[in-house]
């Protein structure tokens, strides 16, 4: 096992690191390099994270009130709570957290700014790859594959490498199978 920080100096100096499996020495292993070789696949993997809580914050003030987002994020900062996914509109912001130990305090403070609702039992499903943001059809393929599953939030910001969707935890197995079939042209083996 290698901690990412132990590999970083080698990657920064363009020194390849090969990670092998001592129980399967015949297997090639994984080569960690500074720059990934080009791939024919736009989407390379599908990952998910369960145990997510969505917090919906709606402004009670007029549209485009100055400082609304700053006030919201100041609460998360002060309560040292990391946010995973953010989706915004003119009067509302939805955020996901994976730690709920400070949920009551967050909701209490946010209610001083706006209307607040929260929903647990959610999951983030993420398509990971190269140039996802710049490749036409990725979102359309994902939404077509998930047409029977309610997608609560979507996030594809400045990162070119991922496309995140928030869904109910109960839908994760079906969502992963459907996305896998859509992007890799085969169902998950063994299921």
Image (tube, helix red, strand yellow):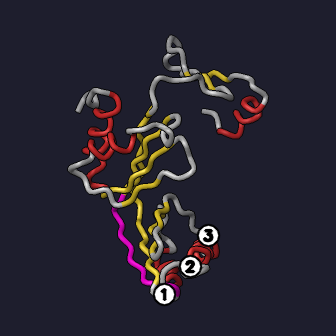
Q: Between 15 and 2, which is closer to the camera in this rendering? A: 15
How many residues crowd around disc 3 within 10 Å: few (fewer than 14), some, or many (20 or more)? few
Residue annotated with mark 3: 80
Residue 173 visible? The answer is no
Q: Between 32 and 142, which is closer to the camera in this rendering? A: 142
Marks 3/2: CA distance? 19 Å
Marks 1/2: CA distance? 9 Å
Q: Is residue 24 above or below residue 89?
A: above
Marks 3/1: CA distance? 26 Å
Residue 78 located left or right of residue 42: right
Earlier along the polypeptide chain: callout 1 or callout 2?
1
Mark 3–mark 1 CB contact (< 8 Å): no
Residue drawn where x is 56% and y is 23% of the image: 38
How many residues crowd around disc 2 within 10 Å: few (fewer than 14), some, or many (20 or more)? some
Q: Is residue 189 above or below residue 162?
A: above
Pinpoint residue 136: horizontal percent, then vertical percent: 42, 38
Residue 121 part of the magenta-drawn span:
yes
Residue annotated with mark 2: 68
Earlier along the polypeptide chain: callout 3 or callout 1?
1
Q: Give the secondary structure at mark 1.
A: loop
Tell me which segment is drawn in magenta: 113-122
Q: Give the secondary structure at mark 2.
A: helix
Residue drawn where x is 39% and y is 73% of the image: 118
Q: Quadrant of residue 37?
A: top right
Pinpoint residue 104: horizontal percent, then vertical percent: 46, 79
Pinpoint residue 99: horizontal percent, then vertical percent: 49, 64
Residue at the far top: name it: 26
How many residues crowd around disc 1 within 10 Å: few (fewer than 14), some, or many (20 or more)? few
Residue annotated with mark 1: 61
């Amino acid at each position: 096992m290698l901690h990412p920080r132990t590999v970083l100096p080698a990657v920064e100096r363009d020194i390849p690191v090969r990670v092998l499996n001592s129980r399967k020495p015949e297997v090639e292993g994984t080569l960690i390099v500074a720059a990934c070789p080009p791939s024919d696949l736009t989407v390379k993997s599908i990952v998910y994270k369960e145990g997510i809580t969505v917090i919906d914050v709606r402004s009670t003030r007029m549209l485009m009130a100055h400082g609304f987002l700053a006030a919201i994020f100041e609460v998360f900062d002060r309560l040292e709570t990391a946010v995973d996914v953010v989706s915004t509109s003119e009067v509302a912001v939805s955020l996901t957290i994976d730690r709920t130990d400070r949920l009551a305090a967050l909701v209490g403070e946010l209610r001083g700014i706006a209307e607040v609702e929260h929903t647990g039992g959610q999951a983030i499903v993420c398509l990971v790859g190269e140039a996802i943001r710049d490749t036409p059809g990725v979102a359309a393929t994902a939404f077509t594959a998930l047409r029977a599953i309610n997608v609560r939030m979507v996030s594809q910001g400045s990162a070119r490498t991922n496309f995140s969707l928030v869904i109910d935890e109960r839908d994760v197995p079906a969502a992963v199978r459907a996305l896998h079939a859509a992007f890799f042209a085969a169902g998950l083996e063994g299921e």
